[in-house]
Image (cartoon, helix red, strand yellow):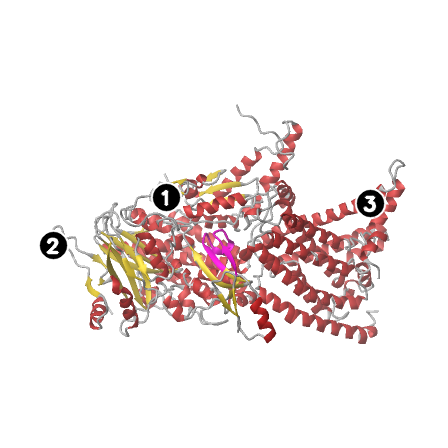
């Protein structure tokens, strides 16, 4: 086991960039500038990924909701309104930066930054391709779960600092909900972890490569029959974790106006949005790593046949991003279809049903791994 | 049982259940103050500009007080200031979701004073319009209720069908929302050619769509869980609060003015057994809960289609307005007419002293009366339930405030 | 039951405060000035006895006016010395209605509140109170309902003068 | 934007930058979920499938004034509400716009003469950018109002010094 933070410094992409920077460094540049540049570059890439995901996510959300509702969604800016997120983003950037009187100013300003920082932290463990990652974290999934759950602190901070009752309600709901669903989420992920025998996302993906193609994905019952229930649990839990309908209670519009972000405006408000979409995407990616083959897809297999390293990397990246957005689409579909559940129903479901079922899945999955899997020819 | 004095000092809250000994002492030390939260006037759940002052203990709503008057538009003062016919457009604007029905109620009240006979074709068209508008109103009620519960999409689906209905009304009277089509003495003009057959096409399509809505929202598991057993209004409470319309029928009281005090053509329609009166039955929860109220509205849409179909089958050519002078002088007297609006009994109490202007036009607005029950049923529910309850009363603020 | 039947029953059970009734009639052809009286009949009730009357009407087994549809008031004209309080009653059991009218002197428009009999009265009475300046004694929550708390005057009275401005917003 | 706002002389660069920034603003006018009366139903109709205001980027109705750019005053304003409207408008972050939708919000409409509580036009309370006639205006009219507002935004200066008028 390697400390995630240490691994970030030691064997991360920044070190790759670092090495490359040393080779191109002109003489007059001082030595200390190199690691700094490397870190800044890596941060730039992370920000780029998060904002791209957010932009694509918001655009998709509006288009998907539009088409579900028999309308088009944005149409006037660019082809089918694909420039809409840019227009929105610049507009939000230009908006007046407001801090309500009576708000706890330092906390109010800090909260969105904290929320965004935590999602960047989680992004570190996300490998875009087998050989393109910020940090090949051995405990990748732990890193992601830990970092994403720190967003709750930011949200609670935002709710408290806003000095608005709606915000406070939103924050309290968020805290209650996230704590309730962290448990089944973590436990449900134990099942694929046991099947894969790995915490490292890239290794998990590698475990699903092989002659069977897509039929070697862990989701299939012949790999482990407890994977399907585990996936359902995981999916429900991530809906709750990312505050998506039917679990969008913290920002329930018809109840709490805009929940914990009621008082936020302009770019600060968009930070929460970025966090939401990035977290959704990240969880979907995690789901595809553990259940749906990760980098593995017919496309990747095809690329592998050519034996061109770059091509394989690109195919893997395309695969994982596509899978992530497919998950995103599913979440949107649910959001625009289902009504919202009530807070007591959320709690009941989390504690009384999901957690015990997740535990049962772990037991069953573990037993299967010990007793049955070793005898299955296709697993080994 | 322990009771804690809140910081405000005014409310004594009693905890249910028996606490362990240690905990009781602990609870006595805890001083909590209930949170006063202000829903509205600008809040997505208040359906317009109503304000509800909630007292909340965490997620639990311990008290609610509706505050009205954010849309008070002096309709009754205007009623006694302008001429009889001039008041008709103002009737459109109190329950703007069912303007045809409002026109009808006012016209009938004035006609009662005048004692005139309305041509049969006018009655037919009146009934078609009123029932179509009932569908439109219930569509919005159901759609926005979905919105309150958190389902956004059904709302847009329902607006889609409503848009067709708007087009129908536009063809017959030129306006989308505020029609002033049903006049004193009949209707403004005859239906344009082809209108009746288009109404028939609408009915055919709507039957299919109606089933979709029921499948999509009405029997949705989450929807049922959110609305069943929530905001229960028992029968006697409903009567005590003077509730009418779907609110009353949702509580299982079999009362519909169209059948029990038939006006216009409803006597004939009821005799032929064209439509039924849907009642709440506590099918998914308790009798009189939010689900029952919504259920009544949803079923009423289908019944309204049946009435429209009957009218389409029986309509015959003829005049559409009685011979009335341009400037009306209404004989002295007073009359009250209540009709079954989508929201309940819309009453018009008109007093005339024989002149061109009314002495009094009183509007008994169903939303206004139905809303009063909130104070009684909201305490003790969760905040999310409170929103479900507000939605299930289906108020139009234009009507509560007039 | 028709109006006659209801009225006779009310007299037979000595409904409190009942003073008379008024029924529509055709105009007298010989008297040119008489335009007659059209519309609905109503019974007249002494204002002080209104709650008691409503209670009796609600509980009598032949009347069963269990639902109060409306309480409103009317200012017949600026010269008239009385306000009317109009009550509409409905019996769900027997499917009949009754209009009740009380005459209140404009000088002291006070009558007891009927909230204890029909809870629906609460808001109707609040509206009446703010619009006509009628005081309902014993009303649990006598605030304005539609008008702002600091509104001056009773808008639905015939002699009401429209305000010039409100909180700095001109009304002209 | 505080430092850069209205600081630069007009030249090719600043006009292009302004054009771009204005384009962003006008392509993403988010209205507030705020309906007053009858016009609100038509406003809802504009948001729905048949008219779909989202095509113009203005479909993200925000319930909180902090995140809204546009206040569509859809309906009659009375004195009790006027103070709240003022407050809501103040809560919106700049740049903010207001549309007076319908006759009532424009000038009291049918309630002008006898409406003792009705404010004779919402412009007595907040500044209004676009007035839309109608009672209620058709959804198309509201879309037209939005176009007018977009034209108005396109002409505004962001980093340029505002044009001097003679």
Q: Is residue B95 visible?
A: no
* Rendering coords of residue C153 (x, y %): 32, 48
Q: Residues within 10 Å of mark 3 (few under 14, many from 20)?
A: many
Q: Residues within 10 Å of mark 2 (few under 14, many from 20)?
A: few
* Rendering coords of residue C123 (x, y %): 37, 59
Q: Cβ–Cβ below 8 Å for labels 2 and 1?
A: no
Q: Which mark is residue A216?
A: none
Say which of A149 and A379 sits in front: A149
Q: Residue A118, relative to residue A376: is it above or below?
A: above
Q: Which residues are magenta?
A: B34-54
Q: Quadrant of residue C141?
A: bottom left
Residue A20 among magenta residues: no
Which residue is tagged 1? D110
Q: Residue D131, relative to residue B317: is it above or below?
A: above
Q: Cβ–Cβ below 8 Å for labels 3 and 2?
A: no
**The residue marked by circle 2 belongs to what chain?**
C
Q: Residue D21, relative to residue A366: is it above or below?
A: above
Q: Which mark is residue A38?
A: 3
Instruction: Name the residue at the left extreme.
Output: C30
Side of D40 where C127 appears, left or right: left
Number of numbered discs on residues = 3
Q: Quadrant of residue A213?
A: bottom right
* Rendering coords of residue B10 (x, y %): 47, 62
* Rendering coords of residue A338 (x, y %): 58, 61
**The residue marked by circle 3 belongs to what chain?**
A
Residue B40 among magenta residues: yes
Give the secondary structure at mark 2.
Answer: loop
Q: Residues within 10 Å of mark 1 (few under 14, many from 20)?
A: some
Q: Which mark is residue C29?
A: 2
Give the secondary structure at mark 3.
Answer: helix
Labels 2 and 1 within one chain: no
């Amino acid at each position: 086991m390697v400390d995630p933070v240490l691994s970030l410094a030691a064997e991360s992409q920044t070190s790759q960039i670092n090495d490359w920077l040393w080779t191109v460094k002109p003489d007059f540049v001082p030595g200390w500038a190199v690691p700094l540049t490397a870190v800044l570059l890596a941060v730039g890439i992370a920000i780029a990924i998060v904002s791209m995901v957010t932009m694509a996510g918001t655009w998709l959300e509006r288009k998907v909701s539009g088409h579900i509702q028999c309308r088009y969604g944005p149409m006037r800016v660019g082809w089918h309104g694909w420039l809409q997120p840019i227009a929105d983003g610049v507009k939000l950037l230009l908006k007046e930066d407001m801090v309500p009187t009576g708000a706890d100013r330092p906390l109010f300003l800090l909260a969105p930054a904290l929320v965004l920082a935590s999602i960047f932290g989680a992004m570190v463990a996300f490998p875009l391709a087998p050989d393109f990652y910020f940090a090949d974290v051995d405990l990748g999934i732990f890193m992601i779960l830990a970092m994403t759950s720190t967003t709750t602190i930011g949200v609670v901070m935002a709710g408290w600092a806003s000095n608005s009752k709606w915000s406070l309600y939103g924050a309290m709901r968020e805290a209650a909900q996230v704590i309730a669903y962290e448990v089944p989420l973590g436990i449900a992920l134990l099942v694929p972890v046991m099947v894969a025998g790995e915490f490292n996302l890239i290794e998990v993906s590698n475990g699903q490569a092989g002659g069977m193609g897509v039929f070697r994905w862990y989701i299939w019952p012949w790999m482990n029959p407890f994977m399907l229930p585990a996936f359902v649990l995981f999916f429900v839990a991530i809906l709750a974790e990312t505050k998506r309908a039917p679990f969008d209670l913290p920002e329930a519009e018809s109840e709490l106006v805009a929940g914990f972000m009621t008082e936020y405006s302009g770019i600060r408000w968009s930070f929460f949005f970025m966090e939401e979409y990035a977290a959704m995407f990240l969880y979907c990616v995690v789901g595809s790593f553990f259940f749906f083959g990760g980098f593995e897809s017919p496309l990747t297999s095809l690329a592998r046949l050519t034996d061109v390293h770059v091509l394989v990397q690109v195919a893997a990246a395309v695969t994982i991003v596509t899978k992530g957005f497919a998950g995103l689409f599913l979440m949107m579909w649910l959001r625009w279809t289902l009504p919202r559940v009530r807070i007591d129903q959320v709690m009941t479901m989390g504690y009384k049903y999901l957690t015990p079922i997740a535990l049962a899945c772990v037991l069953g999955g573990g037993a299967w791994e010990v007793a049955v899997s070793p005898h299955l020819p296709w697993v080994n | 049982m322990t009771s804690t004095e809140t910081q405000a000092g005014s409310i004594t809250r009693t905890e249910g259940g028996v606490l362990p000994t240690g905990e009781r002492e602990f609870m006595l030390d805890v001083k909590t103050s209930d949170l006063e939260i202000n829903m509205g006037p600008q809040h997505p759940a208040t359906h317009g500009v109503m304000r509800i002052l909630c007292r909340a203990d965490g997620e639990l709503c311990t008290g609610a007080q509706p505050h009205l008057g954010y849309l008070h538009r002096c309709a009754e003062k205007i009623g006694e200031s302008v001429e009889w016919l001039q008041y008709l457009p103002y009737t459109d604007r109190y329950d703007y979701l069912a303007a045809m029905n409002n026109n009808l109620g006012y016209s009938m009240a004035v006609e009662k004073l005048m004692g005139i006979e309305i041509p049969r074709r006018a009655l037919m068209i009146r009934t078609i319009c009123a029932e179509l508008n009932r569908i439109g109103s219930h569509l919005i009620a159901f759609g926005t209720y979905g919105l309150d519960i958190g389902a956004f999409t059904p709302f847009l689906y329902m607006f889609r069908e409503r848009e067709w209905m708007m087009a129908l009304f536009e063809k017959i009277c030129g306006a989308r929302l505020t029609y002033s089509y049903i006049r004193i003495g009949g209707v403004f003009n005859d239906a344009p050619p082809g209108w009746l057959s288009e109404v028939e096409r609408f009915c055919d399509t709507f039957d299919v769509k109606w089933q979709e809505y029921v499948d999509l929202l009405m029997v949705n598991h989450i929807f049922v869980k959110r609305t069943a057993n929530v905001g229960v209004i028992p029968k006697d409470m409903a009567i005590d609060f003077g509730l009418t319309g779907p609110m009353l029928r949702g509580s299982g009281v079999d009362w519909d003015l169209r059948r029990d005090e038939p006006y216009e053509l409803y006597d004939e329609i009821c005799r032929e057994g064209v439509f039924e009166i849907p009642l709440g039955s506590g099918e998914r929860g308790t009798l009189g809960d939010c689900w029952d109220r919504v259920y009544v509205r949803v079923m009423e849409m289908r019944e309204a289609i049946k009435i429209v179909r009957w009218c389409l089958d029986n309509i015959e050519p003829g005049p559409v307005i009685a011979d009335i002078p341009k400037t009306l002088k209404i004989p002295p007297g007073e009359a009250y007419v209540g009709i079954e609006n989508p929201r309940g009994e819309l009453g018009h109490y008109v007093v005339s002293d024989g002149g061109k202007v009314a002495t009094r036009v009183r509007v008994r607005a169903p939303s206004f009366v139905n809303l009063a029950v909130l104070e009684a049923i909201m305490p003790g529910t969760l905040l999310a339930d409170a929103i479900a309850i507000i939605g299930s009363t289906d108020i139009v603020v234009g009507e509560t405030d007039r | 039951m028709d109006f006659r039947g209801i009225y006779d029953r009310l007299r037979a059970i000595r409904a409190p405060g009942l003073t008379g009734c008024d029924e529509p009639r055709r105009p007298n052809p010989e008297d040119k000035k008489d335009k007659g009286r059209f519309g609905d009949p109503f019974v007249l009730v002494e204002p002080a006895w209104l709650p008691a009357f409503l209670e009796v009407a609600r509980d009598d087994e032949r009347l069963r006016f269990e639902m109060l549809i409306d309480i409103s008031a009317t200012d017949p004209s600026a010269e008239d010395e009385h306000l009317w309080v109009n009550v509409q009653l409905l019996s769900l059991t027997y499917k009949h209605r009754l209009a009740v009218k009380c005459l209140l002197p404009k000088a002291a428009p006070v009558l007891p509140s009927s909230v204890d009999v029909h809870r629906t009265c609460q808001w109707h009475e609040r509206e009446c109170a703010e619009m006509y300046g009628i005081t309902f004694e014993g009303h649990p929550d006598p605030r304005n309902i539609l008008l702002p708390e600091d509104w001056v005057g009773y808008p639905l009275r015939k002699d009401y003068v429209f305000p010039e401005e409100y909180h700095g917003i001109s009304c002209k | 934007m505080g430092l850069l706002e209205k600081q630069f002389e007009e030249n090719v660069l600043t006009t292009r930058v302004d054009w771009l920034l204005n384009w962003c603003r006008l392509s993403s006018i988010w209205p507030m979920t705020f309906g007053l009366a009858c016009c609100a139903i038509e406003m809802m109709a504009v948001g729905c499938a048949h008219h779909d205001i989202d095509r113009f980027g203005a479909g993200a109705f925000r319930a909180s004034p902090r995140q809204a750019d546009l206040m569509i005053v859809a309906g009659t304003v009375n004195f009790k509400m006027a103070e709240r409207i003022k407050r809501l408008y103040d809560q919106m972050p700049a740049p903010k716009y207001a549309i007076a939708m319908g006759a009532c919000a424009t000038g009291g409409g049918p309630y002008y003469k006898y409406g003792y509580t009705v404010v004779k036009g919402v412009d007595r309370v907040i500044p209004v950018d676009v007035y839309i006639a109608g009672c209620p205006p058709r959804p198309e009219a509201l879309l037209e109002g939005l176009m007018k507002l977009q034209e108005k935004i396109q002409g505004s200066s962001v980093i340029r010094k505002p044009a001097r008028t003679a």
